[in-house]
Image: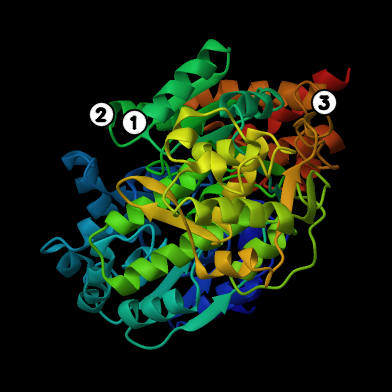
Amino acid sequence: MTDLAQAKIILKKVFGFEDFRPGQEEIVGAILCGGPVLAVMPTGSGKSLCYQLPALLDDGLTLVVSPLIALMRDQVGQMRALGVPAATLNSMTGEAEAGQIWRDIRAGALKLLYISPERLALDGLTEALSRANVRRVAVDEAHCICEWGHDFRPEYRLIRESVERIGAVQAVAFTATADSATRAEIGERLFGAWPQIFVHSFDRPNISLKFAAKDQPRKQLQRFLSARRGQSGIVYCATRAGAERLADFFAEQAFETVAYHAGLDQGRRNANQDRFLREDGVIAFATVAFGMGVNKPDVRFVAHADMPSSIEAYYQEIGRAGRDGLPADTLTLYGLEDMALRRRQIDEKDISDERRRFEHQRLSALAALCEAAACRRQILLGHFNEQAPPCGACDVCRGEILVRDGSIEARKALSAVFRTGQRFGLNYLADLLIGADSDALRRNGHDGLKTFGVGAECNKQEWASTFRQLFAAGALRTASAEHGGFALTEKGEAILRGHEIFMLRADAPREKSRDRARKAPRGGTPAQGENPIFEILRKLRREIAQEQGVAAYMIFADRTLMEMADRRPATLDELRDIYGVGDRKIVAFGEIFLEAIAQACV
């Protein structure tokens, strides 16, 4: 029997999956051949299984380098729930527990050992591991090795040296986001020999994309969350204070909320994260500190209360939704102030001019995605050099965004900037265009300009949208880091002179675009209360999880419960055919779930 044939048997027996997800089989096959491997796979595509499954086929130990304690704890919990011997060595591991782990390692009783890059670099540890029959080292979140990345961890630079000290072991690495430059840096810094590289589609078709310019953002967010009450989700905020305020506000609106940011003490952070991971229907209001440690498969939505820092960060953050493959939604709110703040932050960084240009390019790409008049998914995937047809599922494809030739309005706005000396901000310029009765305009003599009142057909809010879109498109820049205001760029001058057209977008009327949670297709997550058997099974799952002190999804994933509710198995053999039901789950939970299904069907 071939290694891959054995792998498929274990895939069903242990994990409860009939077959590999797209891309997994060829990566598992390459790892089983023993050479270095770098795999770039989107979040939710099953990266971890690609090193967990080979570990079960080997006699030795697979060492997994992971960046966060919470992520390691979660992975170990999932493996143990499947009957796989796994452990983690980190700063929170007690002396007695560590002693038992080393005894298990020496006895060959452990298959997976999760460890942080900082711990791996400690004196003496690699020497001990060199005698521990380590078969391979799997590096998770490998993009952390890249200095220009948004998740840079300098300790990742030490991994290669540690691997070499352990001995002639296989090195494999995984990440969800890595362009060609990042892949090259990973290959150079992490591997002794050039790895076999697998790059799979960045597309997450189960995630719906929606963007909206800020217009009473708290109410916009409230509409979005109200349509998804009872579902688990994440709301990313630009500041710690913002995360706290929104968590408190929505708690008062009877939502289950937690706050998470680096300013909280470690105990509260851990408690809040554990509650989010273990309970159903909790919303985490968080800064980007709430990131790689989130391994919850049934997150049904991710919202951004403020504009993300880059497309790469945005992709990583929305990737925490829908990891179970079921439908998930996103909402990204953004404003001119967000864009200006991000640009100012880049300008104030102590970095090289080359790095600064790179950061500005990344921000411009994100701003263009925010203000896009074409399929969001096409633009997002295009950023990662992947072509795709219109998705039919984003807000643009759904017809929620109206687009027209806005060159006349653009030239009026740019003329206002130019004629006032390229130093004034949005409110002043909008007053000029609508011909407002303004002391400031009279004091500067700008009420006598040709542009005074030339835009009276639009209101101030509409002009604000035009300026925002011009800024996002790179036609305007910040005039002064100290005082703000707008100045024209080369692109802006071309539009002003009529050498380029400018497409202006506007949101569809609110009554047509009012947010509703998408109705899930067959096999998707139903609206709360829509399927009574699913709700009964979810309640049972929650009770068992609370008794065992584990996350609910470690008992069974939502997708598994949905299939149970749909197919209503009556025997253990029928239950075994359900997605995600392996041998260990049959023994531990089979009878009690069959009984619950039978009672629900009476």
Please state the horizontal and vertical placement of residue 582, each as a whole percent of the image: 65, 48
| Kind of residue at disc 3 | Asn
Q: Which residue is mark 1?
A: 269
Q: CA distance from mark 2 to mark 3?
A: 40 Å
Query: Which residue is disc 3 drawn over?
Result: 531
Q: Residue at the far bottom: name it.
A: 193
Residue 187, quarter of picture: bottom left
Q: Amino acid at mark 2?
A: Asp
Q: Mark 2 near mark 1, Cβ–Cβ under 8 Å?
A: yes
Q: Residue at x 45, y 77 (%)?
A: 183
Can residue 296 be seen from the camera position used here? no
Precedes in sequence: disc 2 or disc 3: 2
Please state which of the two labelled residues, at mark 2 or mark 3, is closer to the viewer: 2
Q: Please name which of the two marks, 1 or 3, marks the residue nearer to the observer.
A: 1
Measure the alpha-carbon separation of dots 2 and 1: 6 Å
The local secondary structure at tag 3 comes to loop
Question: Nearest the camera: 549 or 255?
Answer: 255
Q: Judge whether 346 appears above or below 281 on screen.
A: below
Picture coordinates of residue 401 (x, y %)?
77, 47
Element type at mark 2: loop
The residue depicted at 25 percent of the width and 29 percent of the height is 265
Residue depicted at x 47% and y 67%: 361
- SS assignment at label 1: helix
Query: Observer-nearest residue: 570 or 65?
Result: 65
**Residue placed under numbered mark 2 in the picture:** 265
Q: Is residue 492 left or right of residue 524?
A: left
Quarter holding residue 269:
top left
